[in-house]
Amino acid sequence: MRKIEISELKENFFETIGKEWMLITAGQEKSFNTMTASWGGIGWLWNRPVVFVFIRPERYTYQFTEKNDFFTLSFLGFDNQARNTYNLCGTKSGREIDKIKETGLKPLITENGNITFEQARLTLECRKLYVNDMNTDSFLEKSILDKWYGGNHGNLHHIYIAEIISAWTNE
């Protein structure tokens, strides 16, 4: 992978995150987990380039993200292999299966010791700046709460805002 300047990013992240999806990976070389996410964003906050992502506390990746100061966002592409990887990493738990073995992902260690994958066309390496839990009282549009958190949908997400400290590409 080749390191690029963050200012070189030309992605349409609305499409990239919403349609391609991404892998959120946290942990160290000997112990890490990855999960698929299709909610999040990228922008400018506190005079820094940032990402914001959401992870439910019941997800296995949550404990790795909580214990580590860094995580990566890996974008694999739009092809069938990438979609299969995203589907498996979004529906299966790393507590129960070895996602790396099942998907054929090949982990790479960044110069900062974080995990990305050889198959990633783009990786954003991120350092946590802010974390908080969503709470039901803060929803101004209750239909969102009902649709995404009612019934058996699961717990409210934990919000992470992180500075993008480096970007890597395979292109």
Image (cartoon, rainbow, N blue to C red):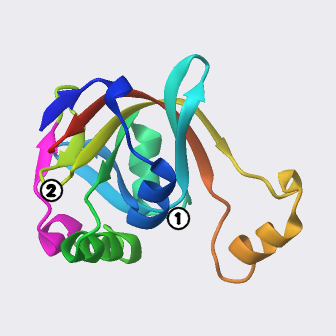
Residue 88, position in %: x, y? 30, 76
The kind of residue tagged 1 is Glu
Q: Secondary structure at mark 2?
A: loop
Q: Nearer the viewer, mark 1 or mark 2?
A: 2
| 119 over 132 or under it: above or below | below
The residue closer to the viewer here, 56 or 63, is 56
**Which residue lies at the image location 22% right of the left edge and 36% below the top edge?**
168
**Which residue lies at the image location 37% right of the left edge and 61% below the top edge?**
35
**Which residue lies at the image location 63% right of the left edge and 72% below the top edge?**
154
Residue 113, position in %: x, y? 20, 31
Q: Is residue 164 left or right of residue 27?
A: right
The residue closer to the viewer here, 114 or 1, is 1
The earlier-in-sequence mark between 1 and 2 is 1
| 161 over 108 or under it: above or below | above
Residue 145, position in %: x, y? 79, 68
Quarter of the figure that contains the C terminus? top left
Going by the picture, which residue comes out furthest to the bottom? 151
Can the viewer see residue 53 in this picture?
no
The segment highlighted magenta reads: 98-109
Q: Is residue 30 left or right of residue 165?
A: left
Q: Secondary structure at mark 1?
A: loop
Residue 114, position in %: x, y? 24, 36
Q: Which residue is mark 1?
A: 58
User: Is 102 included in the stretch rendered in magenta?
Assistant: yes
User: Crowding at label 2, few (<14), some or many (≥20) Cα neighbours within 10 Å?
Assistant: some
Q: Which residue is mark 2?
A: 119
